[in-house]
Amino acid sequence: MEGRRTRMPGKMELVERIAFETGMPKAHAARAIEVMVDALVDWLAVGDRVVIPGFGSFYASERPAREVRSPRTGETIRVAASRTVRFRPGKELKDAVKPRPA
């Protein structure tokens, strides 16, 4: 696929970017990210919806129990109900990643 990026920036790249943009030490930027992630986890665990304007919203979603068929054996398998985290991107994020017309 032409034009597709293979880079996968992670926490360290984010720490470096925050430190560079704000002038704060990398240790403080790393701690700020850790606190943010911990807060997101805490809020999502109790069912809160976390909204970051311009970026999107995170929310917990219930998945009901269901029966599925194994493609290998054809056997019906019961999958237990579960909770998962979902993300809904905000308009600004959607617009930023939308392909630009040529």
Image (tube, helix red, strand yellow):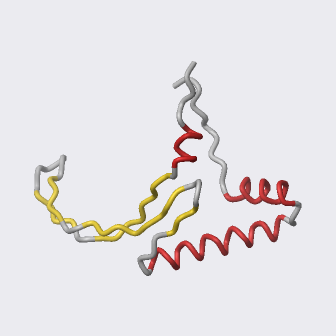
Furthest residue toward left: 75
In the rendered structure, the answer to whether residue 98 lies left or right of residue 71 reads right
Quarter of the image where one finds residue 6: top right
- The location of residue 25, given as percent across then percent down, is 87, 66
Give the quadrant of residue 48: bottom left
Question: On the rendered structure, is 70 left or right of 59?
Answer: left
Q: Is residue 100 above or below residue 72?
A: above
Image position, residue 77 (x, y; %): 15, 61
Q: Nearer the viewer, residue 52 or 82?
A: 52
Going 57% across and 55% down the picture, which residue do you hit? Answer: 55
The residue sitting at 55% across, 72% down in the picture is 40
Residue 4 appears at what percent x and percent y? 57, 31
For the point 51% across and 52% down, which residue is it? Answer: 90
Q: Residue furthest top?
A: 102
Asked if residue 30 lies left or right of residue 100, the reply is right
Say left or right for 15 vs 43: right
Specify the quadrant that holds the C terminus.
top right
Residue 99's quadrant in the figure? top right
Q: Count the marks: how many?
A: 0
Q: Residue at x 60, y 70 (%)?
A: 37
Give how far across and how far down residue 34 sits, in percent. Answer: 67, 72
From what the image shows, is residue 76 above or below residue 72? below
